[in-house]
Image (cartoon, helix red, strand yellow):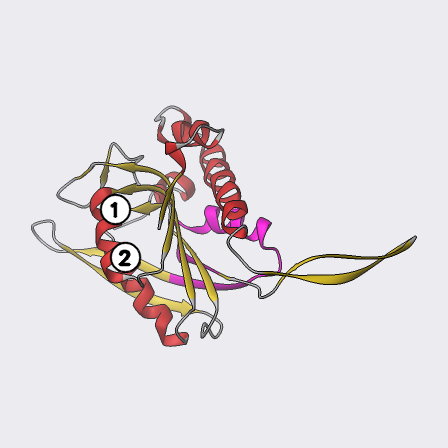
Amino acid sequence: MIHILADRPGVHNVYIRQLRDTELQKDRMRFRMNLKRLAVLMGHQISATLDFAQQEVITPLGTTTGAALAQQPVLATILRAGLPMHDGMIEVFDEADNAFVSAYRRYHQGGDFEIEVEYLSSPDLAGRTVILTDPMLATGASMGCVWEALLKRGEPEQLHVVSAIASREGVANAKEMLPANTQFWIGAVDDETTARGYIVPGLGDAGDLAFGSKKS
């Protein structure tokens, strides 16, 4: 199932506009904050799909019951670009377990690239709900490789993929590589990608905009 926030009215559309704006992108803190705020909104929507149980609560004046997650999700993110959205998710799911994967594009002469996964830190994922954040779902290649890496820690029961901007190609490819019951939560979907796998109009390189340019 694919949930596209831009298809509905709401303040999330303001955050998406600001993320794309080249003038506002000069403020790294604001860029990170908008990714985080978008993730918080998505996190609340994802929470409505999870299972809850009733738990006894002792108040200063008596006893009542309140909701508790039946099982904490695992919040996974792709370093480094995914960190601001991960920060937003952990505000919503503050007791969740966490997983981190380092993945990057290794370019070859002519513009072709392959995805290198260098680092994985994750709890046991067998039977768990995983919420995987990556701001840009461009070709889907990184998402597929990261999913393969996460499977080394067990097969989750449910996967939620969270991205600020995706391309139609990226969504289509990810659907092929990920489990059939994966739910996608995407800010906006753009029609094109460049020969180097960047989304058009997109917003540029989310990692560089959030944390500064890197040496290739």
Q: Mark on residue 148? A: none
In the rendered image, the vertical position of residue 118 relative to residue 205, given as above or below: below
Q: Secondary structure at mark 1?
A: loop
Relative to 52, 156 lies left or right: left
Q: Position of residue 164 (x, y in %)?
A: 38, 41
Relative to 68, 164 lies left or right: left
In the rendered image, the vertical position of residue 117 relative to residue 188, given as above or below: below
Is 182 in front, or is 97? 182
Magenta span of residues: 75-101
Residue drawn at 32 percent across, 45 percent down:
136
Is 208 in front, or is 44? 44
Relative to 157, 44 lies left or right: right
Residue 26 appearing in the image: no
In the rendered image, the vertical position of residue 120 relative to residue 89, given as above or below: below
Q: Are marks 2 and 1 in contact (CB under 8 Å)?
A: yes
Q: Mark on residue 138? A: 1
Residue 56 appearing in the image: yes
Residue type at the position of mark 2: Ser
Is 208 in front, or is 158? 158
Residue type at the position of mark 1: Ala
Q: Position of residue 47 (x, y in %)?
A: 54, 52
Q: Secondary structure at mark 2?
A: helix
Residue drawn at 25 percent across, 46 percent down:
138
Q: Mark on residue 142? A: 2
